Amino acid sequence: MKDILNHLSTIIEARKGTDPSASYVARLLDRGDETIMKKIMEEATEVVLAGKDGDNQHLIHEVADLWFHCLVLLGAHGLHADEVLAELARREGISGLVEKASRGSH
């Protein structure tokens, strides 16, 4: 499944600098971080609401939207899904409490 995340990251990278009227991703990238972050906040709220409504397909749909918009933000910063996947792999086998404590105030 990580292949789809990497594929989407590649597509997002390819959309940089393209015509914002022809691509949703190009439009988000053109409008900048504030617009992308507002979209992420909207999608995160929709994930929470979908989690409460008990419809698993709705929850899957909303999480996919959230992940996609997070990938757009990463791409806006020159980052790729591989970097997030590597961080998750680094954390494997580490207690979440220990990992969080190691980050300090972040």
Image: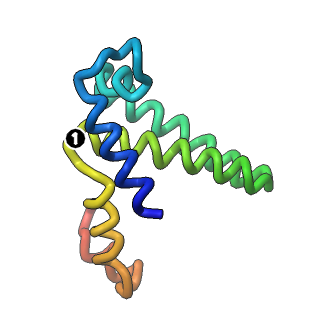
| Percent position of residue 28, x then y | 37, 25
- Within 10 Å of the Cα at label 1, are there few (<14), some (14-19), or many (20+) other Cα atoms? few
- The correct choice, above or below, for 96 with respect to 24 in the image is below
Q: Nearer the viewer, residue 50 or 82?
A: 82
| Percent position of residue 57, x then y | 73, 52
Please name the colour scheme applied to the rendered image: rainbow
Q: Quadrant of residue 105?
A: bottom left
Q: Residue furthest right?
A: 54
Left or right of 27, for residue 40: right
| Residue occupying image coordinates x 51% and y 45% | 66
Q: Residue furthest top?
A: 21
- The correct choice, above or below, for 103 with respect to 61 in the image is below
- The correct choice, above or below, for 5 with respect to 26 in the image is below
Q: Which kind of residue does numbered mark 1 sit on?
A: His
- The correct choice, above or below, for 96 with respect to 57 in the image is below
Q: In which quarter of the image is residue 65?
A: top right
| Residue occupying image coordinates x 33% and y 37% | 12
Left or right of 87, for residue 50: right
| Residue occupying image coordinates x 41% and y 54% | 5
Quadrant where the C terminus sits is bottom left
Q: Name the residue under label 1.
A: 77
- Secondary structure type for disc 1: loop
Q: Which residue lies furthest to the left in this view?
A: 78
Q: How many labels does the image show?
A: 1
Q: Quadrant of residue 30?
A: top left
Q: Which of 51 and 55 is in front in this view?
A: 55
| Percent position of residue 45, x then y | 59, 42
| Percent position of residue 96, x then y | 41, 78
| Residue occupying image coordinates x 40% and y 16% | 22
